[in-house]
Image (cartoon, grey):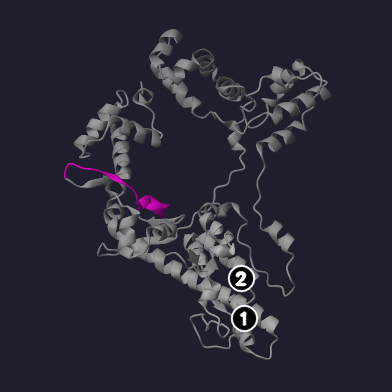
């Protein structure tokens, strides 16, 4: 097997979304001295070429064959890099954010630049609680016990370890009574409900700290939480000698409580999403597809350095250095151009096949295998997969992953097919319109889907889709 380095780079560039491509370009601009954007160094422009390309510099006798990676030469790292690139590109949001090029003529401090461009990880729950605990006024043994408890609080804010397990008289000079006293203080810290040992205690802590009168809710949770979680409201009403309506009102008030208070102090970040493809309809009802690549700078090769690479008066070491960088820059520009063409052609083919979806919504999404698009565009199915990986499309239906427009389906009564996403959309419509006092079972939903034209769908398939939609069973959807 043989694979040219420029082909490897082309595949990597194709798979990058817009934000990832911008980061890649910025890295290349900082590392390759011959590569520049159209807006920089106007005085160095010695050529009237507008396409940013120059004749590739190759020594006599040198050909593309010299650049081929051969498996028998032991250069397997390139293949491993290509094979693992799908996983790596998905994590590009977690990498250093796009750095700004320095306008100074001095060499930048790379360590300082890396530190400045590294995203802040935010404050962890452990650090947040420890910071509050340092301000607590308590005796030394309670302070030590409290810090030990904080070390065992999980990310949701719960203490899953029993206090007796934390006590070790050989390692610590405090007892279980100090742990109990410390836990009571920790449960007064922010966020409300922190340090609880189970769901009941978490809810009771928050209700006790609420400025509103929640005595009824406190009794409800203290004595009937199990039946409350099973949605057995009539049973609870009989035991509490009250109406179901009052319990429903209490449930509405308790919806403000947080069952995972620790997640309020989260280190997770909402990563930016930028549309790579935009679909707009014109007055005639046709759809126009174009790439959202205005933020991608136009690249060119510095003509001054290109002239030096041709100048025989320049020493060979400098010329070889410039030639390698010029070749690398040219490959990058070619790969970016190829990415634009491939992504646009694939997107146009997808929009043409999913026209009804863009007109009417998810229920009209048709089954679309990648092999169909590959055949239309005339490329390999793996290239289609790379082209849509991590990309987002923006239309009147909102912003969504381009990959979501692919998928299988089921046969309908009229002999056609309907995508799985469309079936789930119909299920959601059925569930939303049901009588909540008598919610439908999975079998009833299946029968309703058959009436809507979905042929031979099994009850277990309905149950599977319902779980994927995070929709509870009929018993838990019931409203009294």
Task: Residue 158: name its quadrant.
Answer: top right
- Does the rendering let one see residue 298? no
Determine if the magenta segment contains residue 311: no
Percent of width and height locating residue 428: 32, 37
Location of the C terminus (image quadrant): top left
Determine if the magenta segment contains residue 400: yes
**Residue 139 or residue 47, whichever sits in front:** 47
Q: Is residue 37 left or right of residue 398?
A: right
Residue 464's label in the rendered image is none
Percent of width and height locating residue 169: 80, 18
Residue shown at the point (28%, 54%) measured from the top left: 359
Callout 2 crowding tier (Cα within 10 Å): few <14, some 14–19, many ≥20: some
**Residue 223 or residue 245, whichever sits in front:** 223
> Which residue corresponds to mark 1?
41
> Which residue corresponds to mark 2?
29
Q: Which residues are magenta?
A: 397-414
Percent of width and height locating residue 1: 48, 63
Task: Residue 106: name its quadrant.
Answer: bottom right
**Residue 220 or residue 149, whichever sits in front:** 149
Task: Residue 133: name its quadrant.
Answer: top right
Tell me if label 1 and label 2 are in contact, CB under 8 Å. Answer: no
Instruction: List the single residue furthest toward the front.
Output: 72
- Does the rendering let one see residue 346? yes
């Amino acid at each position: 097997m043989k694979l040219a380095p420029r082909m490897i780079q082309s595949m990597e560039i194709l798979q990058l979304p817009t934000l990832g491509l911008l980061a890649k370009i910025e890295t290349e601009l900082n590392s390759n001295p011959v590569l520049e954007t159209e807006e920089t160094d106007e005085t160095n422009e010695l050529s009237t070429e507008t396409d940013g390309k120059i004749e590739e510099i190759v020594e006599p006798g040198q050909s593309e064959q010299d650049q081929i990676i051969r498996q028998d030469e032991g250069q397997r790292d390139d293949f491993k890099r290509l094979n693992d690139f799908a996983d790596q590109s998905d994590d590009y949001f977690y990498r250093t954010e796009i750095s700004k090029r320095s306008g100074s003529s001095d060499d930048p401090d790379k360590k300082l630049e890396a530190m400045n461009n590294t995203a802040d990880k935010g404050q962890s729950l452990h650090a947040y609680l420890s910071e509050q605990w340092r301000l607590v006024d308590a005796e030394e043994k309670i302070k030590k016990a409290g810090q030990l408890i904080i070390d065992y609080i999980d990310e949701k804010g719960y203490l899953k370890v029993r206090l007796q397990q934390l006590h070790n008289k050989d390692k610590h000079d405090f007892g279980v009574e100090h742990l109990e006293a410390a836990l009571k203080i920790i449960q007064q810290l922010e966020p409300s409900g922190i340090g609880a040992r189970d769901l009941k205690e978490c809810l009771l802590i928050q209700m006790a700290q609420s400025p509103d009168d929640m005595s009824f809710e406190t009794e409800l949770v203290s004595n009937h939480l199990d039946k409350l979680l099973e949605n057995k409201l009539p049973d609870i009403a009989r035991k509490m000698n009250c109406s179901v309506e009052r319990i429903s009102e209490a449930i509405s008030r308790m919806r403000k409580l947080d069952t995972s208070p620790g997640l309020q102090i989260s280190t997770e970040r909402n990563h930016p999403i930028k549309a790579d493809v935009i679909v707009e309809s014109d007055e005639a009802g046709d759809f126009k597809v174009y790439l959202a690549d205005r933020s991608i700078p136009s690249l060119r090769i510095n003509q001054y350095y290109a002239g030096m690479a041709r100048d025989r008066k320049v020493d060979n070491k400098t010329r070889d250095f410039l030639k390698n960088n010029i070749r690398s820059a040219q490959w990058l520009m070619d790969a970016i151009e190829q990415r634009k063409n491939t992504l646009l052609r694939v997107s146009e083919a997808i929009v043409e096949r999913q026209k009804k979806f863009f007109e009417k919504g998810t229920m009209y999404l048709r089954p679309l295998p990648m092999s169909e698009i590959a055949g239309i565009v005339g490329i390999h199915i793996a290239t289609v997969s790379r082209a849509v990986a991590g990309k987002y499309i923006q239309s009147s239906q909102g912003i969504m992953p381009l990959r979501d427009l692919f998928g299988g389906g089921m046969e309908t009564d009229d002999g056609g097919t309907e995508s799985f996403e469309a079936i789930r959309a119909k299920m959601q419509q059925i569930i939303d319109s049901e009588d909540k006092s008598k919610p439908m079972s999975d079998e009833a939903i299946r029968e309703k889907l058959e009436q809507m034209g979905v042929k031979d769908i099994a009850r277990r398939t309905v149950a599977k889709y319902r779980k994927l939609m995070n929709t509870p069973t009929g018993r838990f959807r019931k409203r009294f």
